[in-house]
Image (tube, grey):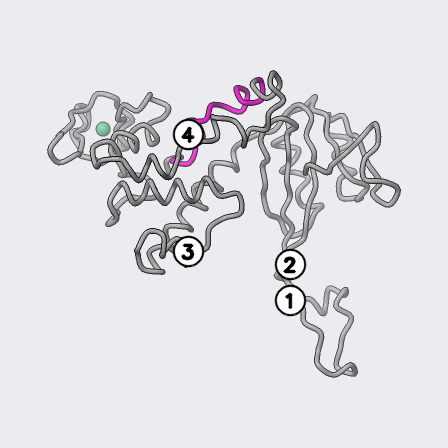
Amino acid sequence: MVPLVRGVGQMGGSSEEFRSRNGQTGQHFLLSAAARRLSLLQVAKLTTDQAFALFKRIRWCDNLGDPVCPHCDCTAVYEYKARRIFSCKSCTKQFSVTSGTIFHNRKLPITTILIAIAIFTNGAQGVPALEMSRLLGVQYKTAFVLCHKLRESLGAEIDEQTASGVVEVDGAYFGGHIRKANWAENRVDRRLAKNQNGKRMVVIIMRERGGRSLPFVVKQEHLAVPELERRIKPGSIVHADEARSWDPLNYAGLDMKRINHEECYADAEACTNKA
Ligand SMILES: [Zn+2]
């Protein structure tokens, strides 16, 4: 899938760019002007032509908004202005601005899709499909699929990103809650694996200080170690809590700083509170 969400992200500059800017100003990225590049108000005011141009810029962000053939990666293309489609000079196939993206075969207008991207990417805590359906004036099922496509695109993009510098690592368990039975004599020990429903998952976060936060999901905390070793660059300083799951990271060429939360939440050496 084409990284549409990366295109939106790049409108705000690269990780290194905003990290250096933050270093200079001490300002949080979300408070900076770069975090306001895709404003809902601006997107809602766009004409169809302007929305098309913006979508091109987001879609082909690596080529400065100029079309690239999704079939053969050729950059020499004809544009049929009236129909808003392109034709490749090399393989002669036709394609649109959404071909090969999550919005391929779209029925929604480009402006509506851009508004959905703006709503979704500007919210910090996700957007419920029902809310999206009311905001866009589309059916619940359409909004549901749209939200999942955006999540899929975000996930695919983040999966390839690496962390470096000072990185805080932590995990939090979600889901799989077993209700207590009504009668006390029917209740079981919910801490035992045999009494759990197996739906509990742990969200792991790698948070670069002054940089990005990269989450991923695993079944148990210790299963995150290979992924952390793959994605945290050697020479980085990693802050983690006292959980034994993180012990193997000590041998992965990383400088580990540990904090025991039974004693305190931060000391002069280590802190994972931002994670
Ligand atoms: Zn082509």
- Mark 1 and mark 3: span between their CA atoms? 30 Å
Q: Which residue is mark 2?
A: 200
Q: Which mark is residue 37?
A: 4
Tell me which corner region of the image, top left, top right, bottom left or bottom right, holds residue 271. top right
Q: CA distance from mark 4 to mark 3?
A: 23 Å
Question: Label 2 near label 1: C-beta < 8 Å?
Answer: yes
Q: Earlier in the sequence, mark 2 or mark 3?
A: 3
In terms of image quadrants, where is residue 237?
A: top right
Residue 13 part of the magenta-drawn span: yes
Residues at marks 4 and 1, CA–CA distance in whole angstroms: 43 Å
Q: Residue at x 52, y 33 (%)?
A: 160
Residue 246 on image: x %, y %: 75, 39
Quarter holding the C terminus is top right
**Where does label 3 land, which residue?**
131
**Residue neighbourhood size for the residue with mark 3, other residues' Cα within 10 Å, grouped as few (<14), some (14–19), many (≥20):** few
Disc on the earlier residue, 4 or 1: 4
Q: What secondary structure is marked by label 2? A: loop
User: Could you say which is closer to the camera, residue 65 or residue 133?
Assistant: 133
Q: What amino acid type is highlighted by mark number 2?
A: Arg
Figure label count = 4
**Where residue 197 is drawn, which disc sits there?**
1
Query: For the residues carrying marks 4 and 1, which lies nearer the camera in this image?
Result: 4
Q: State the residue in front, 85 or 128.
A: 128
Instruction: Locate residue 143 relative to residue 161 in the image: left or right.
Output: left
Q: Amino acid at mark 4?
A: Arg
Under circle 4, the secondary element is loop
Identify the amino acid type marked 3. Answer: Glu
